[in-house]
Image (tube, rainbow, N blue to C red):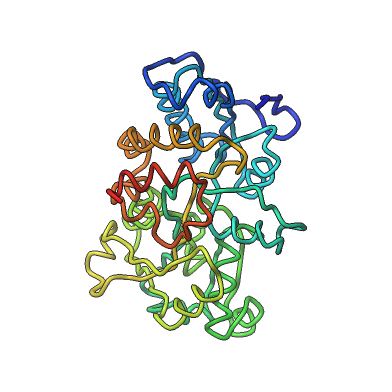
Amino acid sequence: MRHSTMSRKATYLGIFCLAFGAGMFGTAAEAADAPKRITFVAGTVGGAWYNSAAVMSQAIMSEVKGLNVTATSGLSLGNIRLINEGQDAQMGWTYLASVFQAREGVKPFKKELKNVRIVLPGMLGSPYFVCNKKSGVKDWGDLKSKRVITSQLGGQNENLTRKVFGLYGFDYDDIKKNGGSVNHVKFTQAVTLMKDNRADCALAPAPPNNPLGLVLDLENSMDLVIPPIRDDVISKFVKQNRGYMGYPLSPMYKSLKTAGPPVKVIAGVGVIITNKDLPDDFVYNVTKAILKNREKLYEVNKMYTYMKDSKNLTLGVDESLFHPGALKAIKEVQGK
C-alpha cells in the first residue's frame, strides 16, 4: 500500500523511522503484500492521543521488521474519513460512537463509511460536571436552573451533554428561562469563571480514572460537588446511543472520596481503527506489538490502564466491527 503525503489533510508533527527489531510475520508472499509504511493519525498536539501515537509508533516499529510508522495530529471525525479512504492514513484514534455513525452514514457524516475496522479499544472518555457545593447541585437534573458551562459547541462532549439534558426534560433555553445561563468555552476558561463566582458548574472533559490538574486546583479554591447522572437516564442514553456505557468515576478527587455511593456518568470508548483492506497478518502483528508494549502507554496517561484488563479489549464492541487480524491477537491475549 502506497504512502502518500499528508499535507492535504493533516500536518506532519513527528516521524519515527528505522527502528528495526525481530518479528517476521507470515510467509514471504504474505510479507510482500504488507505495507512498508503507515501513517497513524491521532489527536491535537500535546494531547494524550497524540503522545500515545508517538509511543505506539516506536513500539510497532520495534516489533514489525521493515516497517516505518509516521505519527501525525488529527481529529476524531476526520481520522475516520482518512482511514476509510486508506491512502493518506492507515491507523488512528477515534470514538466507538463515531464509528457507528460513520458506518451508518448519519450526522455528522454525509455518507456511509464502510471501510473502517477496529483494532483496539484503548481508553474511556467521560465528561462530568464539577460544581460549586454552594450551588446545591446533587444530580445533573439540578442543572436546569444553574449557571452552566459546557465544552465548545459541536464536539462529542457537548453533544452528549445536550442529549442527557434532553432525557431529563430540559434544554439550554429552559436553563435560561429558569434564571440560569449556558456558555461554551474551554475548560481552562471555565475554571477561571468558577473561581470568580461567575459560574456554578463546568463540564470537565476527562477520562473516569485520571484526575485533571485544573480540577485539583479548583478544589483548593472551593468545596466541589461532582454530580451523578441518574441510573434511568444512563440506561435510556446507552440504548439510544451505541458506543457508550454507564461508568463510575474513580475516587480521584477529594469530593469523590466523601461522596458516598460511586458517582456514575456516561463514558465513550476511544478506539484505534484501521482500514479493512490491510492484510490480516499485518494487522495481527501490529496489534500484538501494541498489546506487548501497552504498559508504555500507561506512562503517557493513566487513562490507558483501561487496556490492562483484557476483558475491556472487547467490552461493548461487537466482534464484527474488529479487523480479523486484530481480533485474533486480542483473543490470544484473552486466552480464547
Looking at the image, residue 53 sits to the left or right of residue 7; the answer is left
Task: Residue 126 in the image: state x and y as whole percent.
Answer: 44, 60
Q: Quadrant of residue 300?
A: top left
Residue drawn at x 56%, y 52% is 186
Looking at the image, residue 110 sits to the left or right of residue 56; the answer is right
Residue drawn at x 40%, y 55% is 314
Task: Residue 174 in the image: state x and y as whole percent.
Answer: 63, 83
Asked whether 310 or 212 is in front, the reply is: 310
Asked whether 144 or 270 is in front, the reply is: 270
Q: Image height check: is 243 above or below 94?
A: below
Looking at the image, residue 275 sits to the left or right of residue 200; the answer is right
Q: Image height check: is 80 above or below 285?
A: below
Q: Image height check: is 177 above or below 318?
A: below
Task: Residue 284 in the image: state x and y as whole percent.
Answer: 45, 37
Residue drawn at x 60%, y 43% is 276
Asked whether 151 or 229 is in front, the reply is: 229
Asked whether 233 or 316 is in front, the reply is: 316
Image quadrant containing the N terminus: top right
